[in-house]
Image (cartoon, helix red, strand yellow):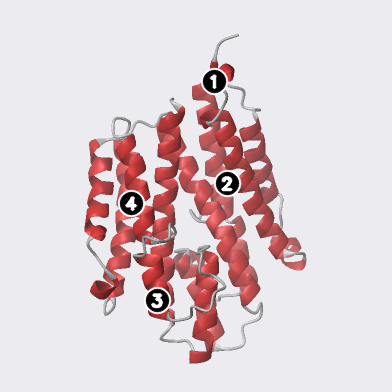
């Protein structure tokens, strides 16, 4: 596969994943404002900005309207929903011959539906807008799996999706576990932990495993180590490893190459960890290590498949 195509498919997938994540976090936190005390609202929205790594995180911007507008529509920031969707569509446009017509129609239709919207359009009923972003992303994923050959290109899409998801989950957990108490003492604190699960579409899945007994250590275990939930770090790193193995086979390179070794190391880091050891140790360091390993895998993917020297691709 051409490195340019792999690059476009990889980033198309990552940008869509980011747009969906931001939309979900915004929707959940706007609903949580109804339960929050006035003095806590600014702090919680500061956590949102830090969790999605927005440039105004840490600034004196605390107005919910301004933050929602910046994260949704402000094209001056590459971390807004509209900027992510536009970037995903542009990457898809450059590889239209590699994706199905249905995939292009879905991502182009999502972009066109959002392009003409503004904060004034959604300020009284934002749920419809954010749900449209989430549903559009889910539809694209389903259409991709149903209409695209499951070859190297499809596997690059999977790598982009799941490495982004693993990194986002680790970063979001790091921010929230640093900010929230590990003992729940009030109804408002309980709602914040429920909100964390909902931000990662994990509340219903969590309740099926642990009922509605929301406890911080169980939340951490579920989102870090559960092998069946699609947004847990364990699930994501396994999918990254599976996709990278398939790509290596397609490219006819050794499965012991640097990319696969790093992915295997990350998988082992998660698989051989126990929640009591993680919680009794330094959770921040553990989550930061996950993010650093994801970054290392990303850099190795580029070195191996995308920005490699042309001499390395020539037969000896």
Question: How many angstroms separate mark 1 from mark 4 (CA)?
Answer: 31 Å
Q: Residue 163 location, x and y as percent?
A: 53, 47
Residue denoted by label 1: 310
Q: Earlier in the sequence, mark 3 or mark 4?
A: 3
Q: Earlier in the sequence, mark 1 or mark 3?
A: 3
Q: Secondary structure at mark 4?
A: helix
Q: Residue at x 77, y 64 (%)?
A: 281
Residue denoted by label 4: 86
Residue denoted by label 2: 237
Q: Residue 15 location, x and y as percent?
A: 42, 50
- Residue 54 lies, with reference to residue 141, above or below; the image says below
Q: Number of marks in the image?
A: 4
Q: Answer yes or no: do the residues labelled 1 and 2 have beta carbons within 8 Å?
A: no
Q: Earlier in the sequence, mark 1 or mark 4?
A: 4
Which of discs 1 and 2 lies nearer the camera? The answer is: 1
Question: How many angstroms separate mark 3 from mark 4 (CA)?
Answer: 21 Å
Q: Secondary structure at mark 3?
A: helix
Q: Nearer the viewer, residue 208 or 61?
A: 61
The image quadrant where one finds the N terminus is top left
Q: Residue 99 location, x and y as percent?
A: 31, 35
Q: Residue at x 58, y 29 (%)?
A: 304
Question: How many angstroms separate mark 4 from mark 2 (CA)?
Answer: 27 Å
Circle 2 packing at 10 Å, graded few (<14), some (14-19), many (20+), is many
Residue denoted by label 3: 66
Q: Earlier in the sequence, mark 3 or mark 2?
A: 3
- Residue 108 lies, with reference to residue 27, above or below; the image says above
């Amino acid at each position: 596969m051409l490195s340019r195509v792999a690059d476009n498919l990889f980033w198309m997938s990552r940008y869509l994943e980011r747009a969906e994540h931001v939309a979900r976090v915004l929707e959940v936190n706007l609903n949580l404002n109804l339960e929050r005390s006035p003095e806590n609202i600014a702090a919680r929205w500061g956590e949102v900005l830090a969790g999605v790594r927005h440039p105004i995180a840490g600034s004196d911007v605390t107005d919910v309207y301004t933050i929602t507008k910046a994260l949704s529509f402000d094209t001056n920031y590459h971390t807004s929903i509209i900027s992510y969707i536009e970037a995903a569509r542009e990457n898809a446009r450059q590889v239209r011959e590699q994706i199905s017509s249905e995939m292009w129609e879905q991502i182009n239709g999502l972009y066109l539906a959002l392009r003409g919207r503004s904060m004034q359009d959604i300020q009284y009923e934002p749920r419809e807008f954010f749900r449209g972003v989430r549903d559009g992303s889910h539809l694209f994923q389903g259409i991709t799996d149903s209409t695209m050959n499951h070859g190297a290109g499809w596997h690059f899409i999977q790598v982009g999706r799941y490495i982004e998801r693993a990194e986002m989950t680790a970063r979001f957990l790091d921010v929230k576990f640093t900010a929230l108490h590990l003992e729940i003492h009030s109804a408002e604190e309980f709602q914040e932990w429920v909100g964390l699960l909902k931000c990662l579409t994990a509340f219903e899945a969590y309740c099926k495993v642990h009922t509605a007994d929301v406890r911080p250590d169980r939340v951490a275990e579920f989102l870090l180590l559960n092998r069946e939930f699609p947004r847990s770090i364990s699930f994501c790193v396994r999918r990254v490893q599976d996709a990278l193995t398939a790509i290596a086979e397609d490219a006819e390179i050794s499965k012991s190459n640097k990319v696969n070794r790093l992915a295997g190391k990350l998988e082992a880091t998660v698989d051989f960890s126990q929640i009591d050891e993680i919680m009794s140790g330094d959770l921040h360091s553990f989550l930061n290590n996950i993010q650093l390993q994801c970054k290392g895998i990303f850099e190795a993917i580029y070195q191996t498949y995308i920005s490699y020297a042309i001499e390395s691709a020539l037969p000896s």
